Amino acid sequence: AQSVTQLDSQVPVFEEAPVELRCNYSSSVSVYLFWYVQYPNQGLQLLLKYLSGSTLVKGINGFEAEFNKSQTSFHLRKPSVHISDTAEYFCAVSEGNKLVFGAGTILRVKS
Amino acid sequence: NAGVTQTPKFQVLKTGQSMTLQCAQDMNHNSMYWYRQDPGMGLRLIYYSASEGTTDKGEVPNGYNVSRLNKREFSLRLESAAPSQTSVYFCASTNGWYGYTFGSGTRLTVV
């Protein structure tokens, strides 16, 4: 069975600084990979996805992620964060017709 | 707005009571899912329905039942609520690997 490890439970960062949220998954077989964002008291919103093709995927709100098959990683990056990026971020991997989620990383952007 | 609608948004139950969480989508999606979200554990799949007329267990099905009433609706039932079922419940739907659409969640407290 697939598993997803988000290596940091919380990431504090100052506004306008770069950030990387790390995600590793367990299986090297072909998978689809996703990042979701959850703002306080809301549902989850898709940030970006990797299905095939270019290993660098661009998403909404200036986020991007890089698929690394050899390291089974799919880290999320943003070159300059804003206060409004404060939220919880979830990495997810496909397993059959289901998604398996990581435990989440809380991004706290400080002014 | 098109999307996934969950009712109720909040619920408090006494131990042993039963209730049904409702979910409806208007995007003509084939697959629907029920997840629970607990702090530090991400989202865990309870049950899913890959298509109308089918349902399957996920990672944490004990204490729950589901009904795929038609293509639009997928309900989750707690027959005898327990404090361990205190959680936030999310319904999601999809038509393929373009990303799930999530509802806004139901916050359930069992006392």
Image (cartoon, helix red, strand yellow):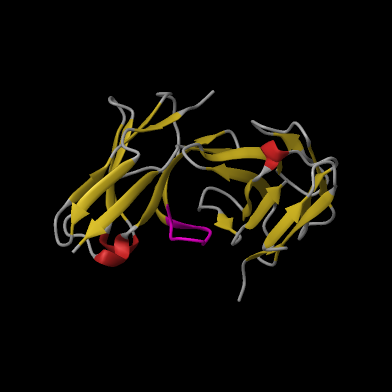
Residue at 39% across, 49% down:
A89
- Between B45 and B25, the one lying in front of the other is B45
| Residue A80 percent across, percent down from the top left | 17, 59
Residue B66 in sight: yes
- Between B50 and A90, the one lying in front of the other is A90
Q: Residue furthest bottom?
A: B1
Count up the numbered dots: 0
As for residue A42 lying within the magenta part, the answer is yes
Q: Residue furthest front?
A: B111
Residue at 29% across, 38% down:
A22
| Residue B34 percent across, percent down from the top left | 67, 46
Q: Is residue A87 above or below residue B79?
A: below
| Residue A16 percent across, percent down from the top left | 14, 62
- The residue segment tinted magenta is A37-46
As for residue A99 lying within the magenta part, the answer is no
**Quarter of the figure with the N terminus of chain B:** bottom right
